[in-house]
Image (spheres, rainbow, N blue to C red):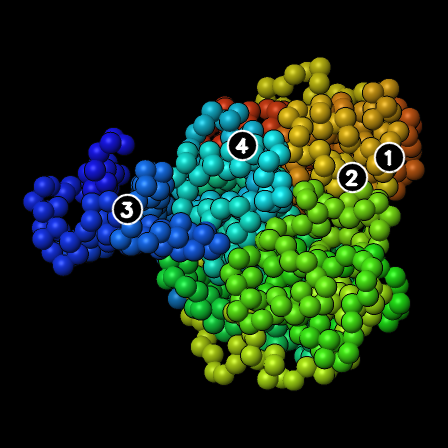
Amino acid sequence: MADEPLHSRLVQILQTIRGVRLDDDAWASMQAGEEQPSLHSLTVWAALSAYLRRNGHEKESDAIQQTLSIATAPTNLGGMALSWNDPVATEEADELLLLTSAWLESLNSAERYDGVVAAPLLSRPASRPPMNVTEKIFALHDLSHAGYVRTGDIITISVDWVMASEASWHGMLQAYNKLGDPGVFRNDRFWLAGDHFVDPRLANTPLMQSLVRKMDFARKRFKMTQFQGNNYTIMHTEFYRERAQPGQIIIGSDSHTCSSGANGCLSIGLGATEVTMALVTGQIWFKVPEVVEIRFTGKPARGVGGKDIILYILQQLKRNTVAADRVVEYTGPGCQWLSSDARFAVANMTAEFGGITGIFVPDVVTKHFIESRKTNHHKKASYYFKADEGCSYAELYEIDLSKAEPSVARYPSPDDVVPVGKVAGTKLDGVFIGACTTAEEDLVAGALVLQAGLDAGLKPVAHGKRHVVPGSRPIEQHLRKTGLIDIYERAGFTIGIPGCSFCVGLGADMAAPGSVWLSSQNRNFKNRMGKGAIGSLASAATVAASSFNMMVRSPQELIDSIPEDRWDSVRGKGSLPTGALEEPMWVEPPGQDSAIGVNTSSGAATDAASNSTATNTPRSVDKSTLDTIKSKVYRMGDFIDTDALAPAQFLLTSDTNQELGAHCLERTDPDFRAAVKAGCEVVVGGKAFGCGSSRQEAVQALLGIGVKCVIAKTFAFIFARNMPSLGLLGFTVNNDRFYELAETGAAIEIDLVHNAMRIGGEEFTFALSPLEKRLTEIGGSTNAFSKFGKRIYDALTRGVAVSTGKVHEPTEKHKGTTIMAW
């Protein structure tokens, strides 16, 4: 086929994928028409697109145009930089034909998916109880189409997008291969970004070459339309700017997938295996979570953006407390003062706050941001929901934005937040402006602070490292066009390519042991920026102000000196819009509304169901391993994070659970591995066990060294999902007496038939949902897929729980919630 003329290969692809036949006369008419294409250039595609449009094949014509857009775009923006009339080389032709196949196949994908999410209603049915925004989005995607969900329901939902980085795709590909290469649910809804490790400085390393090959496999095997190449964008940045739409459900293999919640969608991070299941099936299961409302009031001070606001929230409410195992809805009159980029930073660090995800209730700012996109393709599937009067929230907290100020989160806790003045003068070895948290607006602010300092006569001292990384090529282009990159360079900063850089301490950029840094990234755990490095968090503006003398300094004086028209002259697309804005069209989830009170397709996971011996009896299990576990305890404390359980430096070079286990907690608890081998196979932790990144390798590492069960007061959401998905038993116990007895070395017996434990001569019970127990019994999601195929979630959720029949009936909004003002 490679030796055939380009137009013949194009015609064959069009016929094979879309069933559109073009005979010789059709091609002859194209050659005789106005286009008169050269048989060896892009004009072949242009002529074909024009012909298809004239003959009623608009969709196919648009797909060809998408190929042409990529073909002619600059390489630094993800394109091929081809000229219209130049001959197309063989390799270029092969790439163009692959792109054509991908975009034509995307039409088939969309048609297969059409109707999975039904058209919304324009008003709420009178019989339907009120719902918050989170519940409405779940109801929209609930495959039972009941029209209504409530807290505790276990439902199977459709997903709109799946996201991954090259680092998480490494693990996803392992899971995908175990499934037997089943294909993906949509070739146009898989967003893959090379950002964590890939870097031109590492191009000759075997590891980077391996990661690039794995991404290339995905691109070609799945005929992906959504891949712009390595270091085009940090995973979350351009996805939020140009893809995520209000009302969608997005599943990503990264804990900061929550970033896109800025756009009024549910964007949720999970482990690699579960995300692979979503990629293959287009579905995922969820237990509808509680929702906490953070209501913004007041107006933030000039120069105070999303980073300082989320740091203020963390200071007041602390991490893994009110947000733990909940969705956080950000609402209130204060939102009118928050740009889309400010919302992005807040939603992004909802991961550090401890939430499942964060979502801003969409409004006029959201609509303006979505409508500003380049293509209609990524703005026509938006569904705008608002909370009903009388809807239920678990708790409500009010945050006065006028009280937020430039702050620093001190190493090693993102909630150890103090005003900049309290740590002013702290000496620094390095400053970093970048990572996914740092949006375009923040990078602009950092540059303007630097300009204000330079104009005031400040000069960067000789010592220390200064580094800035734009979040994407389009953002970098804006910074160059406006001269802001030049300002960074004048202030002594080196400019990196889009990627995670120092925030993961994984690739070419790692902070030296013992070095002290101030960074605009989102996570300041031990060893995060590099082994032994000490990193604290602040806004880009604060980092910029501190860079001159390499000492922590408030940016406020410099911010106050920046003229308003200077801010306006360099505004980016995510900045707060001005002028009159159009209200969205509000909609409601579709559905039958015939079974309110009883979700017959899936049911609600209740304590009664979880404690029922009948529903929890194992179906087909290995009696020696799953009926009873007899072991000894290894005791840990609060906030055991996944960075410690599975250090980043070993994630991409370890192929087995045992290899990952060899490094488990080696930097923070070096005695742990030996203790497990000596018989302490039940880990007992405290609060938020498994907090941090979404890396499922943390669970794999525990399995790899022989851990049989993890018990904790609370688990981080993603870690809790990863355990049953990978076949590791885990559950929570909230009994102080148990933790008094559960010291390292204590004998423990766990009875999984009756959900009971014996330790120190006393007995304690625990709850484990039937779905989680069944997944653990089967040995995880990949084994379940082998058993049930693409109907895995229907099989796992069918009949596993019983509804209580209770419906929330508050007489007014927030009835029964705790309201606290800060």
Identity of the amino acid at label 3? Answer: Pro
> How far separated are the C-alphas under marks 4 and 1?
30 Å
Residue underneath mark 4: 173
- Secondary structure category for the residue under label 2: helix
Q: Is residue 629 left or right of residue 623?
A: right
The quarter of the picture where residue 636 lies is: top right
Q: Position of residue 479 (x, y in %)?
A: 57, 67
Q: Is residue 794 left or right of residue 655?
A: left
Residue underneath mark 3: 87
Q: Position of residue 685 (x, y in %)?
A: 82, 38
Q: Position of residue 93 (x, y in %)?
A: 31, 41
Q: Which mark's residue is nearer the viewer, 3 or 1?
A: 3
> How far separated are the C-alphas under marks 3 and 1?
61 Å
Labels 3 and 4: the sequence-earlier one: 3
Residue underneath mark 2: 644
Residue 56 is at least partly visible in this image: no
Residue 91 is at least partly visible in this image: yes
Q: Is residue 490 left or right of residue 483?
A: right
Of the numbered discs in the image, which one, if any, rests on residue 669?
1
Labels 3 and 2: the sequence-earlier one: 3
Identity of the amino acid at label 1? Answer: Asp
Identity of the amino acid at label 2? Answer: Ala
Identity of the amino acid at label 4? Answer: Leu
Single out the residue that lies furthest toward the left. 25
Asked if the residue at tag 1 contacts the one at tag 2, i.e. Cβ–Cβ closer than 8 Å, the answer is yes
> How far separated are the C-alphas under marks 3 and 4?
37 Å
